[in-house]
Amino acid sequence: MTIRIGVTGAAGRMGRTLIESIVQAGAPLQLAAAIEQPDSSLVGADAGELAGLGKMGVLIAGDLADVIEQIDVLIDFTVPAATLANVALCARHGKAVVVGTTGFTPEQEREIDSAAQQVPLCKASNFSTGVNLCFKLLDMAARVLGDEVDIEIVEAHHRHKVDAPSGTALSMGGVVANALGRDLAEVAVYGREGQTGPRDRDTIGFATVRAGDIVGDHTVIFAAEGERVEITHKASSRMSFARGAVRAAGWLFERSPGRYDMQDVLGL
């Protein structure tokens, strides 16, 4: 059995890393299609050469529709509008989808939910095994420390990231809020400036850094009087995300239609 995988945004940093990860994973996973924007000068180039792996015979396509029948699973780490179009196409053709794109609106999330009724779909804010372990640790820490601590989340990414806070930071905040019985939409504070007054213990603060080539750093601070606990994850390479996404693609292949996340893939 061969699981044929397609990668969108193939010429980007994450796309090239995904291609490398699929090759490293080996059988039964196989890179079957690589897709870029139709006006890209790289359409027609060999995806393997683009990723620095030598010729693979998979030429970059300018439209997912042209190669949709060549794949079993699509991995999409692009931008919300493009991802939604790709997910809809996959749903119509019965192809599983792994979504690593972040920054969706609530309405766009509902579109993804609708597609997941037709095909298996795995969406996660972060596909790193370490980050998903952190989600479990955060749940435990929040339940143990309870309402006796102030909670702040600090995240840092490269200067090209367009959404803030990161999807991973928001997921971390959601894990903590759920553990404490709070609604993140009501208690989140996104940055502070001026005379803000004393801190409300129930709030969960977010701070964002965008600089240089930082791959992704996340720290959740649980601060009490006299002590604090910090849970930190630092990514030094996109390969950690790519390996997780490729693992999810293989896991998703034989699943029933539905929406899954990386916690499902890892059995957490």
Image: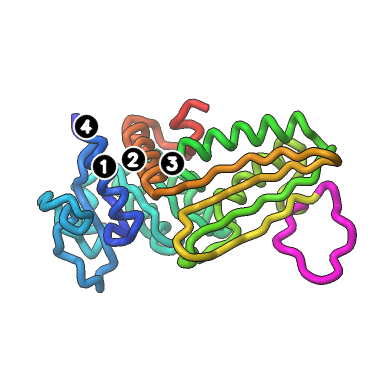
Amino acid carrying label 2: it is Val
Mark 4 or mark 3, whichever is nearer to me? 4
Q: Secondary structure at mark 1?
A: helix
For the N terminus, the quadrant is top left
Can residue 196 be found in the magenta stretch?
A: yes
Q: Is residue 118 visible?
A: no
Q: What residue is pinned by disc 1? A: 22
Mark 4–mark 3 Cα distance, whole angstroms, equals 19 Å
Q: Which mark is residue 265?
A: none
Q: Nearer the viewer, residue 148 or 236?
A: 236
Mark 2–mark 3 Cα distance, whole angstroms, equals 11 Å
Mark 3–mark 1 Cα distance, whole angstroms, equals 17 Å
Give the vertical position of 72 relative to 68 (above or below): above
| Most common SS among magenta residues | loop
Q: Which mark is residue 122?
A: 3
The answer to which of marks 2 and 3 sits earlier in the sequence is 3
Dot 1, how many residues are within 10 Å of its Cα: few (below 14), some (14-19), or many (20+)? many
Amino acid carrying label 3: it is Cys
Please state the extent of the stretch shown in magenta in the rendering.
Answer: 187-202
Colouring scheme, one of rainbow, by chain, secondary structure, one colour: rainbow
Image point (51%, 58%), residue name: 157
Q: What residue is pinned by disc 4? A: 28
Amino acid carrying label 1: it is Ile
The answer to which of marks 2 and 4 sits earlier in the sequence is 4
Mark 1 or mark 4, whichever is nearer to me? 1
Q: Position of residue 94 (x, y in %)?
A: 31, 43
Mark 1–mark 2 Cα distance, whole angstroms, equals 6 Å
Q: Secondary structure at mark 4?
A: loop
Q: Secondary structure at mark 2?
A: helix
Q: Is residue 23 left or right of residue 223?
A: left
Q: Is residue 230 left or right of residue 79?
A: right
